[in-house]
Amino acid sequence: MSGFLFVVPPLVGHINPTVGVAAELAARGHRVAWASADPGLVRRLAGDEAVVFPCAGPVLTGEDGVRPAELRGPEALKFLWERFLVPLAEAMAPGVRAAIGEFGPDVVVADQQAFAGGLVAERMRVPWATSSTTSAEFTFADALAGMPKVADWLDTLLHDLRGRIGDPSGTADPRFSPHLVLAFSTPELVGSGAGAGAGDRIRWVGPSMATRPTSADFPWTWLDPARATLLVTLGTANTDVGARFLAECRDALRCRADRMQAVIVDPANVLGANADLDDLNDLNDMGEKDDKDVLIRSSVPQLPLLERVDAVVCHAGHNTVCEALWHGVPLVVAPIRDDQPVVAGQVVDAGAGIRVRFGRVTAPKLGAAIDAVLHEPGYRAAAERIRTAFRAAGGARAAATHLEELAGATPSKEAT
């Protein structure tokens, strides 16, 4: 029996892929624990019984922790690193050290944006693996060769961070373990050349799918099998900028009500805030709106719903894209920021979807893109090809086996 400590940032999309891996390891008899700045979030996603060592989070005051919605390109990258990733690493480091000391893991599994995991493990001489929850990081790392000033700036940031919380004599990039990098995708989506800089450390395990806690109040009988069904979602971190886009989606879909219906995820109720009188008459007791054509919910059971939809409109978040393609569902992607433009490019290059401009797309253009992915067979064929590759990659079971090998444990019979 070996021990595995998962070090994760307080972000749903970075925790979800590791939940299935942790559950698989536990099922094989290994000890599993977590270190996070949001223990409650980990337990909500991984289960109330999860062992979680608390870490501090960055102390952000005033406007420091609020990223302006208009930030793009280099300024967005600078904000992400200087205002979130580096402060998060420094804040988490004492908790990670304490967790390693108390739990005694054989392997630390560090999310690629939770730098404290890799740096502290390196300092404490514990083998560590990277949990790569977005494959865009490989593309970005490869692209740095053509951006020497950006590469030098990041090298300086990481060098200084290592001096504060890690081993000053260490050399490993905390985003990419020198031992093992678990990539929750496959080359069929990412592209055959991605990640070349990380060499043979990368293991393409495909999406890690795990049962998630869901509410029982979703109105499954509302779905009309005689019409195509779409899911529209902007994930959990984009509610502040989604009002216009979701409204355009609603208008495009209502114009096609004779042949399709849609479920729109609106956690911040931005459509309610902009609703007209007829919409307000549709509000239900939970503050959610529905009619026979468009169902608007604050949250949905995404994985079960993806089994029943014909296309997805989303922000090109890595998890949502991979979960859609796991089900062979084509996409319309409207990237907003961070890794999303890269992931959207992967979808388009693979032939599994169409990209639209988040800030400028109109209902007619959205409608045309939706019509195309629904009715032009090439998009679904590409999505199904990626689905086949994803399912063959092994997911959580394959990831658990690679971690067992790093720990020097003998893989269980269930893994072979």
Image (tube, rainbow, N blue to C red):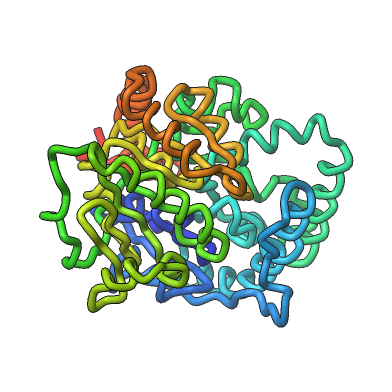
> On the rendered structure, is 411 left or right of 322?
left
Q: Residue at x 49, y 39 (%)?
A: 333
The quarter of the picture where residue 292 lies is bottom left
Q: Residue at x 44, y 29 (%)?
A: 353
Is residue 187 depicted above or below 18 in this figure?
above
**Percent position of residue 295, x then y:** 27, 57
Q: Is residue 415 visible?
A: yes
**Percent position of residue 336, x then y:** 59, 49
Q: How many marks?
A: 0
Is residue 363 depicted above or below 3 in this figure?
above
**Percent position of residue 403, x then y:** 42, 44
Quadrant where the N terminus is found in the figure = bottom left
**Percent position of residue 172, x then y:** 70, 45
Q: Nearer the viewer, residue 294 or 63?
A: 294
Q: Residue furthest toward the bottom? A: 61
The quarter of the picture where residue 401 lies is top left
> On the rendered structure, is 379 left or right of 11?
left
Q: Nearer the viewer, residue 280 or 211?
A: 280
Q: Is residue 410 visible?
A: no
Q: Nearer the viewer, residue 208 or 182?
A: 208
Q: Residue furthest toward the left? A: 221
Quadrant where the C terminus is found in the figure = top left
> On the rendered structure, is 339 left or right of 212?
right
Q: Residue at x 85, y 52 (%)?
A: 156
Q: Nearer the viewer, residue 251 or 105?
A: 251
Q: Residue furthest toward the front? A: 277
Q: Residue at x 63, y 62 (%)?
A: 116
